[in-house]
Amino acid sequence: MKAAFFLLSLTIALLALSGCARVHQKDREFLSDPIMQRSTDPMADGMESHNLPRREGAVGGSSGSGGGCGC
């Protein structure tokens, strides 16, 4: 009984670890999916980021990390 439990837990652990893959930083750009981008037009993205603070009445939050409080 203990051997079967050990074998089952070992199999589950190996299956869980088999889905992990290390991707080098230089290869990540090729794996990023274009469908995850908000827009495929860089000109439109630049215009949107330029006009967004005026339309929303707030500045910042489009890049970098923050605490979530807007400061």
Image: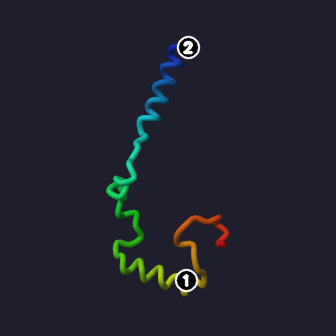
Q: Position of residue 33 (x, y in %)?
A: 35, 59
Q: Position of residue 11 (x, y in %)?
A: 45, 25
Q: Quadrant of residue 32?
A: bottom left
Q: Position of residue 9 (x, y in %)?
A: 51, 24
- 25 relative to 45, above or below: above
Question: Is residue 23 toward the left or the right of residue 64 in the image?
Answer: left
Q: Quadrant of residue 45?
A: bottom left
The residue closer to the viewer here, 11 or 49, is 49
Q: Secondary structure at mark 2?
A: helix
Q: Amino acid at mark 2?
A: Lys
- Residue that numbered label 1 is attached to: 53
> Which of the two labelled residues, at mark 2 and mark 1, occupies the earlier sequence position?
2
Residue appearing at x 45%, y 35% in the figure: 17
Q: Residues within 10 Å of mark 1 (few under 14, many from 20)?
A: some
Q: Secondary structure at mark 1?
A: helix
Quarter of the image containing the N terminus?
Answer: top right
- Residue that numbered label 2 is attached to: 2
**How is this picture coloured?**
rainbow
Question: Is residue 1 toward the left or the right of residue 71 in the image?
Answer: left
Q: Amino acid at mark 1?
A: Pro
Residue appearing at x 40%, y 63% in the figure: 36
User: Does the residue at mark 2 contact the one at mark 1 (Cβ under 8 Å)?
Assistant: no
Q: Residues within 10 Å of mark 2 (few under 14, many from 20)?
A: few
